[in-house]
Image (cartoon, rainbow, N blue to C red):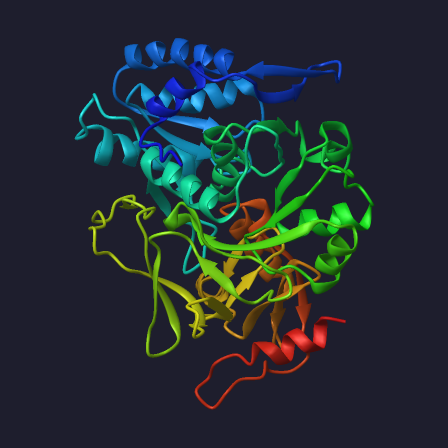
Amino acid sequence: MKKYESFLELTQAFAEREGTALLYTDEDGDICSVSYRELAEMIMMRTELARQRGPGTSIIYSAPDPDTIARIFATVMGGRCVIMASPMMPEKVLEEAQEATDRLICRHKDPAEEGELLFFTSGTTNRSKVVRLTPRSLLCCAWSGQNMFECGPDDRILCMLPLCHVFGIVCSLLWGLAYGATIALCPEVSDRLKAPMLFRPTILPVVPAIADALVRNDALNPELKELLIGAAPCSGETVQALKEKGINVYIGYGLTETSSGIAITKSMDEPDAMYLCPDTEVEIEPDGEIAISTPCMMKGYLGQPETTEDFRLLTGDLGWLDEEGRLHLQGRKKDVIILSDGSKINCPEYEHDIAEMSGETDIALIDVDDEIILVVGAGADTDSLWETVEEYNKTMLQSQQIADIVEFGRPLPRTLTGKIRRYELQRRYQY
């Protein structure tokens, strides 16, 4: 099984391959196609334009269309770095990342080398960091996935995940393109419920929120064989409904820092047992934290020292390994809310920032119906606090913004050491 080392090597394979690479809809809603050879031509034509621009950093928004995909490949192959951006990201954040990438990476890299791809984390241990990934690390992860769960020319993968997330770009795009599948591009978020019946995929990578919606609306096509779920826990009810439809369900675990997946289930009869991808090593720290070594590791965070070959990533996740070496997850080491779209909210950081801005210290974040709620103790000035929250929300992605403020009516429950008893608040407001 071929392990591609660069976007150039993969594009050269496209040029020699038969079959359809991409499906998409035009302005009239008709399905159009791009062959692998046509995709290679699109990429190579744009690569020369990227080289002419010289070293630097491009911001590319993750629009689900052939031109954007060709531009991502070509920009990187032309030696430029790419910041994978979401339309919801504040312009100031993107501009700061672009300036830092130009200064810290592009100014010092070999122009003959392919550029890096930079992704924003979903905020696991603090606010989003910028992760430096390479074509080699991303394609290594695609190869690892192929070893765990094969796709091929007879498969059609529906891409409805944003390409600004590594789960989306690896599992919805690069994995299929590397091994000859057809990638169907879902045009808009509003079209997700229609896309399976329109494109008739055999494989569908999704986050739990999308899986729940597709099941709830009976929107899955009969040709669908496998559903790959990642980024957050999925409800047992959804998994059972998928199994009843004859769809194989695989649950993946991975991080932006590891170029996406590092472990995956093989049977929903053992839904908590995840098998490690090739060459991935996991150690459990004395406090139960998962530490990972993988050839798919990031080059580092933007502005921080580069990782070395023996680098071990402390994930912040808790887990254990069984006698067969399978990984079992047990939750987060720190107080982190994981929303159904995969967004991770570090509660103490939010609480500290809002307390600094407002002067209100008896506050806590909880998750209610997949929304972030700020709970305040007795005596808080909620009108003033709302003004603070609105300003704070302007610095965050839409999915990571605080949706509401609720008054607890008395001081918030705390442990003897002063830590919020968050589970008590969660239990009170969940229903």
417 in relation to 359, above or below: below
Q: Quadrant of residue 233?
A: bottom right
Residue 286, horizontal then vertical, whole percent: 33, 79
Residue 405, horizontal then vertical, whole percent: 66, 63
- Residue at 52%, 79% in the rendered image: 420
Q: Is residue 346 left or right of residue 132?
A: right
Q: Quadrant of residue 310?
A: bottom left
Q: Is residue 383 left or right of residue 2?
A: right
Q: In this view of the protein, can residue 250 be seen by the observer?
A: yes
Q: Nearer the viewer, residue 46 or 201?
A: 201
- Residue at 30%, 28% in the rendered image: 115
Residue placed farthest to the front in the image? 1
Residue 180, horizontal then vertical, whole percent: 51, 27
Q: Nearer the viewer, residue 75 or 98?
A: 75
- Residue at 45%, 30% in the rendered image: 178
Q: Nearer the viewer, residue 387 or 345?
A: 345
Q: Quadrant of residue 44?
A: top left
Q: In this view of the protein, can residue 333 be seen by the observer?
A: no
Quadrant into which the C terminus falls: bottom right
Quadrant into which the N terminus falls: top left
Residue 167, horizontal then vertical, whole percent: 50, 44
Q: Is residue 259 left or right of residue 413?
A: left
- Residue at 57%, 15% in the rendered image: 34
359 in relation to 298, above or below: below
Residue placed farthest to the bottom in the image? 416
